[in-house]
Image (cartoon, rainbow, N blue to C red):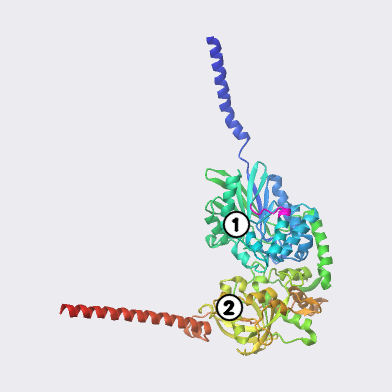
Amino acid sequence: MKKIIKIATLALFLTITAGLLLLPMSSAAHPEPEISILFTADLHSNFDPARFMTDDGVIAERGGFARMQTAINRIRETHPNTFLFDAGDWSMGTIFQTIFTHEAPEVRLMGQLGFDAAVIGNHELDYHAAGFTEMLDAAMASGDALSGLALANIDWDSMFADPALANDAQALRTAMEQYGVALDYMLIERGGVTAAVFGVIGPRPIAYIPEAGLLFHDYIETARNVVARIQAETDADIIIALSHSGFNPENPLGSDCGRLAEAVDGIDLLISGHSHNIVYEPIIINDTIIVSAGANTFHLGHIVLGQSDRGIAVESYQIIPISQDIPKDMTVQAQIDEFRVTVDRYYLSMFDYTYDQILAYSPFPFTPIEEFGRHLGEEPLGNLIANSYIYAVQRAEGENFSPVYAAIAPRGVIRASFPQGPLTVADAFAVSSLGIGPDGVPGFPLVSLYLYGRELRTIAEIDISVSTLMSGARLYVAGLTYTFNPNRLLLNRVTSVQLMDLYGDVSDLEDDRLYRVVGGLYSAQMLGTVESLSFGLLQLTPKDAYGNPIENMEDHIIHYGDMELKEWLALAWYLESFDSVDGVPTVPARYNDAMGRKIEIDSRSPIELLRNPNRVFFLLLGAILLVLAILVAAALLIIRSVRKRKRKKAAASA
């Protein structure tokens, strides 16, 4: 019996020992799985690569979906369980967007590349709720593999309660549910890792789509609620937010994505879009890792995460340039080529153009779009666009042309630039690619309005003062020349404004005279908000030819025949109008330099600081004097009260 007990004890000892020895071996055989994530943002329908000039003066290409597919495949060769996400604005920016509603090329190509999810950004709603609904329906009808989509902070209840929004909102909700858009969060499992993913859009992008027909909940409160549900309802290994709200790595807590990370606990990874910024090293706020890969398919981000004592930790991170050294994936390229044929058939045929048709040749490059408009001065491309508006209106109106004294092109609507070399129809569209007209045809149309001379002075002040706070308000104006001093009081920096025609001849501006002005529909609509946004300090009201305030800007769209005159078409016509060199219209050398439209006087001398003060200066001066008067009156009352008490005290002691 004792022998049996000894044998049993020995067996138990050996079993326990073997188990203990096997534990570390088992752990080594099954390590914590890595979390590999590829990410993009602001793809803006850039299926084809963009041309640019290198620092060595060589024309090269970058970006494009076909090369990005190759880069994605390379990562997946070494990290086969990689997720792929996008942070919004994956549409609108090239001529491929013209088939957005009936071909859905973006989500179909993104599905081909293997995108697991993409948040819906503001530009996805450029064609309003109805246009986005049509796109979803077209995508599903294609039968192709499609990218996942997500957006959690749509305020459905408020839209359903609004008679003006309810019908489109219901159609959109139905299409989203049929497509499978994640209206709260989605769970994606790959390689033993479960990722909980949700998407939100922030307040600044929302402000750009007032006509979209959608209402939204606060993005921070929505994120807080979604994260709480994920934590309560799932065993997800990682929580990922796709946030189309903007991020500035130089001022993390001053940007919307930074505020989101700071305010909401539990987000492991936040992929940011909207600002077009590249985050070259991950930024961590409140244990949330924030990343962004820039815009226009020029870069692809890759982050590998692992577990640490504190939770999710960064193991590796890289921003991969999509350069021309990366070969194109020919399957993706074949699909892009098919979409190009569709663009010619369904859109450009209306204008008697084709995608690759050369309009002109530029012997020099214009400022690259990522650097465009960063300073207060002129931009040759801005001058070119503004001039094209005047030329195109004259061509469209013919004998009925009424003189245009100013044309306005804001920085915010200029979406691409021109390289050196041949400029095609697709290039012209990319520069002015935003929006859709009341005719349902993609592209914002030009409109005609009238402003008093004093309001044209306000236009100059918006450009110089307001654009320092809102870069999208930087303006390029044909027809005016103005001087400014950046050292003067805000909203009082412009010291003189004059008319200047396209030949450089200058004349005085009459404050009480109406002048005809042209610009894009969206830009003109935003002009009407200047007075309210500036609390009445800047006064500007778009008017008709008789001086009556314009109630509906769409009534003042410029047409040629039965068609709206689109912004991009004005640019295309203007490029074709240039004198030919060797049989090809060529951009004149004058567009390689400033034209004297914005003249900076950088001076701190009292004379320059006080010269030609405007209405705002006197309003602020009056306010300052009023405050001083109140302070002086208060001080006199205090002195009088003190003296009175002293006299009473002296009388009492006597």
Q: Position of residue 225 (x, y in %)?
A: 57, 53
Does residue 582 appear in the picture of this structure? no
From the viewer's perspective, tell me whether residue 600 is left or right of residue 589: left
The amino acid at mark 1 is: Tyr
| Mark number displayed over residue 650 | none
653 lies above or below 290: below
Label 1 to label 2, Cα distance in Å?
40 Å
The amino acid at mark 2 is: Glu
Q: Position of residue 219 (x, y in %)?
A: 59, 59
Q: Position of residue 560 (x, y in %)?
A: 79, 79
80 lies above or below 99: above
Q: Position of residue 220 (x, y in %)?
A: 56, 58
Judged from the image, the secondary structure of the residue bearing numbered disc 1 is: loop
From the viewer's perspective, tell me whether residue 215 is left or right of residue 106: left
Magenta range: 177-184
Q: Quickly name the residue at label 2.
A: 531
| Mark number displayed over residue 280 | 1
User: Which secondary structure is most common in the magenta stretch?
Assistant: loop
Q: Does the segment drawn in magenta span residue 181?
A: yes
Q: Please tell me which residue is depicted at 29% across the width and 80% down the height of the picture.
A: 639
Does residue 430 appear in the picture of this structure? yes
Image quarter in which the C terminus is found? bottom left
